[in-house]
Image: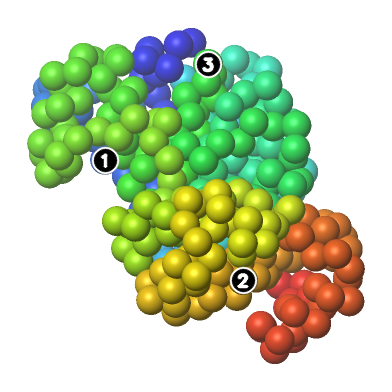
Amino acid sequence: MIPSALRRFGFLTLPNYSMIACANAIEPLRMANRLTGRADYGWTMLTLDGAPAAASNGLSLGPTLALEAAGPMDAVLVCGGVDVRLSVGRPVKTALRRLARQGVALGALCTGSFALAEAGLLKGYRCAIHWENLQAIHEEFPEIDFTQDLYAIDRDRLTCTGGVAPLDMMLNLIGGGLGREVADQVSMQFIVDRTRAGEERQPSLAKSHSVVGHPALEKAVRLMEERIEFPLSAAEVATHAGVSARQLERLFRQRLGHSPSAFALTLRLDRARALLRQTAMPITDIALACGFTSPTHFSTAYRRRFDRPPRAERAAG
């Protein structure tokens, strides 16, 4: 079924799912029905056993049905959130594979894309996931085309980041299914001044308030983010940014409070912390993926930044 023809949605909520992402996907459907005066869209909250799942804020959405008791659906969106890895066991993967065999379109909100990846259902698709998990999932599933886009609609896969981005994705689907006028009316009801396209990029440090408006600084930070595995020297970054090393040093200290080298090290260590918490990658591999030439150097730098070694970080996670 083409995405614009989707009408009956199931939201498979995993423990600690993101309620803001889930609500931002449901509410446009409700408002579209209200505006047309028809039941164009339907939605059902789902879990494997029918018991409501608690979101990361401690609340639950209901009524909730067991997935097998829900009846026919055009699409099922996996709603992920905090510690998604702990929520994706064999029963979840088996259920998702069964839905795929039945021809149900599959999607994900926030970190729910991890469940689809674990089930082997994203190979050959362009996919989105929340920026906080993006690099970790890149390392774990290098064969999948994960993107920094807000959302990705690729044939029968609809994957979206978190926060308010699901609102944009659903407005896109409503525009394709009921027409642009209805989608615009939904936007007006929610006081949304524009619908973002899926290919718009997720936020990055290069787009933070401290950096925007300084082209050389934006370029330098973006380059550091992109070259974490193979870091450049401060002089090389300055050259690529089109400024002198002294100018770059001054910009970083004025706007970000760090030297370029210290800022780049912080980026690499933050990436390492995410990989330790979100993946099962060996610590040596994480060190290499974050630009450290030896496990000893990595462990020393990590302990200095976070007051504990990488092994203790993984044990705590």
State yes or no: discs 1 and 3 in contact (Cβ < 8 Å).
no
Q: Is residue 273 left or right of residue 43?
A: right
For discs 1 and 3, the disc positioned in front in the rendered view: 3
Q: Judging from the image, what secondary structure is the residue with disc 1 in?
A: helix
The crowd level at tag 3 (other Cα within 10 Å; few <14, some 14-19, many 20+) is: few
> Residue 217 appears at what percent x and percent y?
43, 59
> Residue 92 appears at what percent x and percent y?
68, 42
The answer to whether residue 95 is seen in the rendering is no
Q: Which residue is mark 1?
A: 27
Residue under the image location 54 percent in, 75 percent down: 259
Q: Judging from the image, what secondary structure is the residue with disc 3 in?
A: loop
Alpha carbon separation for disc pair 3 and 2: 43 Å
**Which residue is at the front of the view, 102 or 201?**
201
The type of residue carrying mark 2 is Ser
Q: Is residue 78 left or right of residue 62?
A: right
Alpha carbon separation for disc pair 1 and 3: 23 Å
- Which label belongs to residue 111? none
The type of residue carrying mark 3 is Arg
Q: Is residue 83 left or right of residue 10?
A: right
The crowd level at tag 2 (other Cα within 10 Å; few <14, some 14-19, many 20+) is: some
- Residue 143 occupies which quadrant of the picture? top right
Residue under the image location 13 percent in, 19 percent down: 181
Q: Which residue is mark 2?
A: 261
> Residue 215 appears at what percent x and percent y?
37, 52
The answer to whether residue 20 is seen in the rendering is yes
Circle nearer the N terminus (1, 2): 1
Q: Is residue 283 above or below residue 175?
A: below
Q: Which residue is mark 3?
A: 155
Alpha carbon separation for disc pair 1 and 2: 45 Å
- Residue 308 occupies which quadrant of the picture? bottom right
